[in-house]
Amino acid sequence: MTQIVAATGNEAVANALRQVEPDVCAAYPITPQTELMQRFSSFVSDGKVKTELILVESEHSALSACIGAAAAGGRVATATSSQGLALMWEMLYIASGFRLPIVMAVVNRALSSPINIHCDHSDAMGARDSGWIQLWSENAQEAYDNTIQAFRVAEHMDIRLPVMICYDGFIISHSIERIEYLDDDVVKNFVGEYKPLYPLLDVDNPKSYGPLILPDLYMEVRRAHAEVYKNVAKVVLEVAEEFKKTSGRSYGLFESYRLDDAEIGIVILNSAAGTTKDVIDEYRDKGVKIGLLKPRLFRPFPYEEIGKALKHLKAVCVFDRADAFGGSFGPLYLDIATSLYHYRKKPVLINKIYGLGGRDYMPEHAEAVIEELIKIAKTGRVRSYKEYIGVRE
Amino acid sequence: MIGWKQIPPGMVILEAGSALKIKTGSWRAAYKPRWIEENCIQCLLCWLYCPDNAVKVEDGKRQDFDYEYCKGCGLCALECPGKKGNKAIVMEEEVR
């Protein structure tokens, strides 16, 4: 029986971790993730889970301990934000290179400097090429659901890759929402018993992790690694289909909102998608054919599927909650542009940088962009391909 | 050499003891260790410290060096306690 509660995003993800009950969890506190692991460590202290909780001295150590525990043969989870994710940097690549199915909540927060504890996506975007699968979540319900599904995706024998579950710091992590929890035994059955692939603790079959690979073999190892990512989208959809049967809630590679008959569109990640959908409804009522695409599986990026979903539009704005300094456009824009590049007929594409360091994203921001898209669709003229919005001159 | 389709997940090496296929003795540059049996107390510290497979042990007893796996690092000579102040392993210049 489903339980309906009022809970924060962090509380919901902590509850998902309690229900999954990983073998090992190594974590270090960092705002706005702290509440998540604080709640999970209470479950450990209160004997609600048998998870081995390892308190470490940094995020570099946290992920190192997770890598060791996962290679040993355990189901492993952790969580972090911002500087913590940045400090994990070198270990991120090792976790994915070793093909270890570690699940990590990334509570999105701006990167220093200047130091700031509020939401933007620069932390997870900085790690987008580290070989981790990334599932992004609009609200606490999606963060909870994505956490449960992440274990199945990560641990699938065709994949065996680490997964990040991204959700917005404070906006989602600390705001109370209505959430539907699955029953404990339903979650336990859904994730199933953990099957290690090459456990080091299987001492009767000795093995070595992390060999030195020199120029005579390195290309082959990386080529084999690249192949694995082709399996991910299929497995994400299979797991989502099964999750729908269990929960009644549907997930895909991305969410399409009123997009099929649309002429203009917005692409936006995480919590700001909710605000944008409300504004889209207002414009739809006025007869404007506008829709939205919200990526869920951001890594590996489903280029073909997203290209097909957007190519019929006349004008699209991609919102980025992170800039790529010194690069051309925001990180989400670059992937959307690549998805559309091969089509002869494609929408005009503009990029807005918004919400950095927790700056509020308001309905009037969406309205101004929609007005701009209407003009572009009508005239074909573009005032600016990339600009910051919600910023004082 | 194998192609990319033969690469195991995570490049985990599933064959135990496969390092024996890499003979590191060719790396040795200037010095090689010499075992002096009469000074050896069979503590096996050299076997423990050797980063490769150069110290052979049979029936719990140290045998002579296997130079095919000796890089000449000198750790064994450094750690060797010897007998009454006389080292059982000394590094000597090697003429190739």
Image (cartoon, coloured by chain):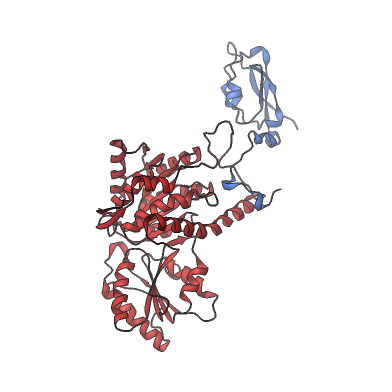
Chain colours: A red, B blue
Q: Residue at x 41, y 77 (%)?
A: A316
Relative to A353, say whether A24 is above or below. Answer: above
Where is residue B72? Give x, y as percent: 65, 30
Q: Residue furthest front?
A: A1
Find the residue positioned furthest to the right: B96
| Residue found at x 53% / y 46% | A98
Horizontal and vertical percent for residue A153? 47, 53
Say whether residue A328 is left or right of residue A81: right
Residue A42 or residue A84, whichever sits in front? A42
The image quarter containing residue B46 is top right
Above-or-below relation of B40 to A351: above
- Is A80 displayed left or right of B54 in the figure? left
**Could you say which is closer to the camera, residue B53 or residue A169?**
A169
The image quadrant where one finds the C terminus of chain B is: top right
Residue at 28% x, 62% y is A358
- Tell me where residue A245 appears, x and y as whole percent: 41, 57
Find residue A12 and report its horizontal and vertical position in percent.
Answer: 30, 51
The answer to whether any part of residue A119 appears in the image is: yes
Q: Is residue A299 above or below residue B44?
A: below
**Residue at the far top in the pictured view:** B84
Instruction: Tally the marks.
Output: 0
- Whether residue A168 appears in this view of the structure is no
Q: Report whether B10 appears left or right of A259.
A: right
Q: Is residue A259 above or below residue A161?
A: below
